[in-house]
Image (cartoon, rainbow, N blue to C red):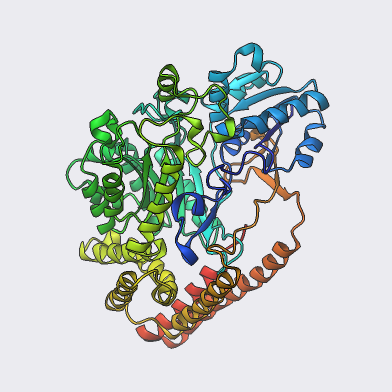
């Protein structure tokens, strides 16, 4: 008989809240990208992906528990799986070790595997004899090959990476549950640049492990758009998508040949240095690959002078040229470096804000066990002997490390202030998205390139959805400067796209009323934040084994393990809206066929269908 495998993320909520921020690490919208933007703070959720990557590439039948509560995991582990694998981050080590104790007690014959960044930390901090009571194996690196060897399966079996569960972001007062409008695919692992603070560098020994060919990646992006209605973006997970121009351009060529073409939008991670190697017209070439948004490691204005080669290059040019072509940005900045002083850290933060990133990630420098930075600081006596796992997070207490020129609480205050200043200077990220989409629409049309026509249409449709929030951004702006900027943005929208249709104006008024109601609630409660997204639901995924899945077929089935009647009611209402949306689209096409309607009439009906579609995206 084939061995049975149980994979799990750490049980919830242990290890899922950051110490300094007191935010769940699952909410990347508030914790990382749009913090302190008042009513316009986005809340997000992405599923944990790497267990999916492993499970669908094993012949053994596999169950994966995502965000299980303690009772869910204990019940499942008691069924006596031959292998139990737990994927964990550094700040989840204690929770994972508790899970290991439970497995040893309830299913002593099970072999336990710990993987992920937390396993790298355990390998650094614990001897093999200390690890043995908890785990039989530590998976450090690429997990598919490791698990295949452990289970005695052929390592040469082809890889299949598809049907990753989607995520997204929302304004909770506008839509309580997150629309699954961000598709996901994992393209490669590892990073060759070797930054001393990077766990990925150590996990993969400065190698880039490519999992999908450009053609396979394009096919998966096409599948996501075809099978997941309402998809706004596809997140491609790899450390630096720009590091191999030949690969990315081959993908762009394959994507343009699909049914979706450049109407698809991709979010990728990238580095400034890798963009420089694209040579002349590099930003045009990147745009033609379907890139719509990118996460860029700014790290620090001074990073290139301090031995971080990934940051070499003209970063201001990168931000400006990407924005010009309709590519939004997430700028990642770190404070607490040894070279940061009270004299230059404010200059460094001001530099980041001057780039006008669409979103941003501001963090403290955290030396993760296993990295070169951790070993250096420990040798210098700056890592505490009583190191607490729960503090090991970019959003925690920096691992308790003694910073050279600051106390931890000073860095936390600097980061919170940086988020507030960004909002008070540039307004909500939603409106920065709108500005960049208008840039992209004008740029794509100005090139005269017929290949970019679908991209211009994508920018136009996205801008039409975002403009619904313009009246709220004007009325609820944090200050007069931002309010004036929002009014100028509204005027520009009318010049570029046209006056909002009656349907758009009606929907924008509805959004404004919801925003006013939310503001009133917050004033009554006397607190800045009122709503937050619900806790992530516990899900059981069942994988039948790679040999039992036909090409193109979804490799898993799923079920929720917790009752959520409010969610179920919301989902039923949303399904009704989705059917209404489909009917509106059908009626629009019939009306167009029968009357050959004029352009203004077509715009009104199409906009109505698009707005309803945006509100009817599937809900997590």
Q: Is residue 568 shown to the viewer in this render?
A: yes
Q: Nearer the viewer, residue 126 or 432?
A: 126
Q: Quadrant of the C terminus?
A: bottom right
Task: Find the residue positioned furthest to the left.
Answer: 280
State left or right for residue 340 relative to residue 171. left
Q: Which of 349 and 620 is in front in this view?
A: 349
Task: Find the residue positioned furthest to the top.
Answer: 129
Please give the name of the residue rendered at 30% of the width and 74% of the height, measured from the top-left corner.
484
Q: Nearer the viewer, residue 39 or 231?
A: 39
Please give the name of the residue rendered at 45% of the width and 33% of the height, measured from the top-left corner.
366
Count of marks, rendered view: 0
Please give the name of the residue rendered at 27% of the width and 78% of the height, measured from the top-left corner.
495
Q: Quadrant of the N terminus?
A: top right
- x, y percent for residue 96: 66, 31
Please give the name of the residue rendered at 33% of the width and 49% of the height, measured from the top-left corner.
289
- x, y percent for residue 240: 37, 38
Question: Above or below — where is 313 with respect to 284?
Answer: above
- x, y percent for residue 567: 70, 62
State left or right for residue 421 relative to residue 211. left
- x, y percent for residue 120: 53, 24
State left or right for residue 28 relative to residue 311. right
Question: Above or below — where is 337 with respect to 577?
Answer: above
Q: Is residue 116 shown to the viewer in this render?
A: no
Location of residue 103 by image quarter: top right
């Amino acid at each position: 008989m084939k061995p049975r495998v149980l994979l799990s993320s750490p049980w919830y909520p242990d290890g899922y809240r950051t110490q300094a921020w007191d935010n769940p690490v699952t909410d990347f919208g508030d914790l990382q990208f749009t913090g302190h933007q008042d009513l316009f703070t986005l809340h997000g959720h992405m599923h944990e992906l790497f267990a999916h990557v492993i499970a669908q590439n094993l012949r053994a039948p596999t169950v994966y528990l995502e965000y299980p509560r303690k009772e869910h995991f204990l019940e499942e582990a008691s069924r006596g799986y031959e292998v139990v694998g737990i994927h964990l981050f550094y700040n989840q080590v204690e929770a994972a070790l508790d899970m290991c104790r439970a497995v040893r007690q309830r299913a002593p014959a099970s072999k336990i595997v710990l993987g992920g960044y937390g396993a790298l930390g355990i390998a650094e901090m614990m001897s093999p004899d200390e690890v043995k009571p908890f785990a039989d194996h530590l998976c450090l690196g690429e997990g598919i090959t490791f698990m295949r060897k452990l289970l005695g399966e052929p390592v040469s079996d082809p890889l299949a990476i598809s049907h990753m569960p989607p995520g997204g972001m929302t304004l909770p007062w506008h839509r309580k549950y997150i629309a699954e409008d961000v598709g996901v695919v994992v393209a490669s692992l590892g990073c060759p640049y070797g930054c001393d603070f990077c766990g990925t560098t150590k996990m993969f020994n400065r190698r880039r492990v490519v999992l999908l060919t450009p053609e396979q990646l394009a096919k998966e992006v096409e599948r996501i758009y075809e099978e997941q209605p309402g998809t706004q973006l596809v997140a491609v997970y790899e450390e630096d998508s720009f590091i191999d121009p030949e690969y990315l351009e081959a993908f762009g060529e394959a994507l343009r040949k699909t049914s979706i073409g450049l109407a698809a939008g991709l979010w990728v991670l990238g580095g400034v240095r890798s963009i420089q190697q694209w040579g002349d017209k590099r930003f045009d070439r990147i745009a033609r690959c379907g890139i719509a948004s990118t996460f860029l490691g700014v790290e620090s204005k001074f990073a290139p002078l301090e031995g971080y080669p990934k940051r070499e290059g003209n970063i201001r040019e990168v931000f400006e040229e990407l924005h010009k072509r309709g590519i939004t940005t997430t700028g990642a900045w770190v404070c607490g470096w040894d070279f940061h002083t009270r004299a230059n850290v404010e200059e460094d933060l001001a530099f980041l804000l001057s780039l006008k990133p669409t979103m941003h990630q501001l963090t403290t420098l955290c030396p993760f066990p296993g990295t070169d930075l951790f070993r250096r600081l420990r040798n210098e006596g700056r890592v505490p002997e009583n190191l607490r796992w729960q503090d090991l997070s970019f959003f925690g207490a920096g691992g308790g490390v003694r910073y050279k020129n600051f106390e931890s609480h000073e860095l936390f205050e600097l980061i919170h202030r940086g988020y507030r200043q960004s909002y008070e200077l540039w307004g909500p990220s939603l409106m920065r998205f709108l500005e960049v989409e208008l840039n992209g629409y004008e740029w794509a049309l100005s090139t005269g390139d017929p290949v970019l026509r679908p991209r211009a249409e994508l920018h136009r449709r996205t801008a039409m959805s975002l403009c619904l929030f313009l009246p709220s951004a004007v009325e609820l702006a944090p200050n007069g400067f931002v309010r004036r900027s929002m009014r100028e943005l509204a005027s520009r929208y009318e010049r570029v796209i046209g006056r909002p249709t009656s349907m758009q104006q009606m929907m924008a008024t509805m959004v404004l009323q919801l925003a006013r109601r939310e503001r009133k609630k917050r004033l009554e409660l006397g607190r800045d934040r009122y709503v937050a997204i619900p806790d992530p639901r516990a899900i059981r995924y069942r994988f039948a084994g790679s040999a039992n899945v036909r090409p193109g077929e979804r490799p898993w089935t799923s079920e929720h393990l917790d009752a959520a009647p409010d969610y179920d009611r919301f989902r039923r209402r949303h399904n009704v809206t989705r059917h209404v949306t489909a009917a509106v689209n059908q009626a629009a096409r019939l009306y167009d066929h029968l009357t050959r309607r004029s352009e203004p009439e077509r715009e009104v009906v199409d906009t109505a269908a698009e707005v309803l579609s945006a509100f009817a995206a599937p809900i997590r």
